[in-house]
Amino acid sequence: MDIKESATYPYPIWGLHNSFLGDVPEVSEKVSVHNYEKNSIDISFEVTTRNAGIDRLIEEGRAKYDCIVKCSTTYYLQHNYFDSPSIKISVPTEQVHKRFDIQTVIVATEEIIQCDYLELDEIYEGYADYPKGAVIAYIDECSVSVKQHNHASDLSKIISVTKTNANSVKNVFSENKIIIKIPETHVPQYVTAEAHYPSVIASNLVYTALVQAFYKLRDNTDDSKDWVFYLRQYVKECDENGIISLDNDDYILEFDDIFTIVDHLLDNPLIAALDEIAGPNNQEE
């Protein structure tokens, strides 16, 4: 449901065009919690501004709050109806990608004819009609970024390996993925190494690709690209957790910070590779 302030509607909407007298709608700060048990993002907030006429419509069962969740990437759509200004919603993380929008409105649950107790601008002459499903109030709209919670799984979504006719390994950065291209002549060796020494692959091919990718963030600001979005989110997470100290919002990272981030993201891959090569017998010694 797209509500535009520049559009003209055949009925008054609280929150647009000063159709209603009095205060405009406002909401409290949104609280967002990642529920790992349910694999969801739980969001709560409250509509803090009251409007007596619209409250009466809700009390009479003629209108409801509708908190709408939309993800433009997955086309996920969720309607959440409430009789109370206290809004609590749960968004399944597997249904959304990168970010989703939350729009809060009040809609008519039945046809409303000649409602005469709303405080309206004088142009409406004291009455308002609403068809069933019409938006009576536009409360709020915001965008929520989906934070990563399983880094191994998320990396598999943005990194892929393919073969190439070239005679050396190349990293290519597409719209959505970091593509590690391996010479066709060495694909069998790669398959064997991945099966028996996955940490060696992580500490070599993946590590190198990620170092290059994090460096490229300074020139790639379009987070509609999956790999840019994911890596920028991870840099924020590292900054918030004190792993690095980000001095700017431009994602211009020093090489020391890049190596620290990649080590943390891959869970100390160089040590893991050494242990893997040594094998369990040598580790015990």
Image (tube, rainbow, N blue to C red):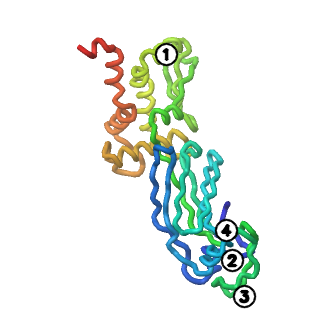
Q: What residue is pinned by disc 1?
A: 190
Coordinates of residue 146 in the picture (x, y in percent): 50, 47
Helix, strand or loop for disc 3: loop
| Mark 2 or 4, closer to the camera | 4
> Whole-Å distance between the Cαs marked 1 and 3?
76 Å
Q: Earlier in the sequence, mark 1 or mark 3?
A: 3
Q: Earlier in the sequence, mark 2 or mark 4?
A: 2
| Mark 3 or 4, closer to the camera | 4
Q: What residue is pinned by disc 3?
A: 125
Looking at the rendered structure, the kind of residue marked 3 is Glu
Coordinates of residue 34 in the picture (x, y in percent): 46, 49
Looking at the rendered structure, the kind of residue marked 2 is Pro
| Mark 1 or 3, closer to the camera | 3
From the viewer's perspective, tell me whether residue 21 is left or right of residue 232.
right
| Mark 4 or 1, closer to the camera | 4
Q: Is residue 105 above or below residue 143?
A: below
Res 12 label? 2
Q: Earlier in the sequence, mark 4 or mark 1?
A: 4
Q: Earlier in the sequence, mark 2 or mark 3?
A: 2
Q: What residue is pinned by disc 4?
A: 107
Looking at the rendered structure, the kind of residue marked 1 is Tyr
> Whole-Å distance between the Cαs marked 4 and 1?
58 Å
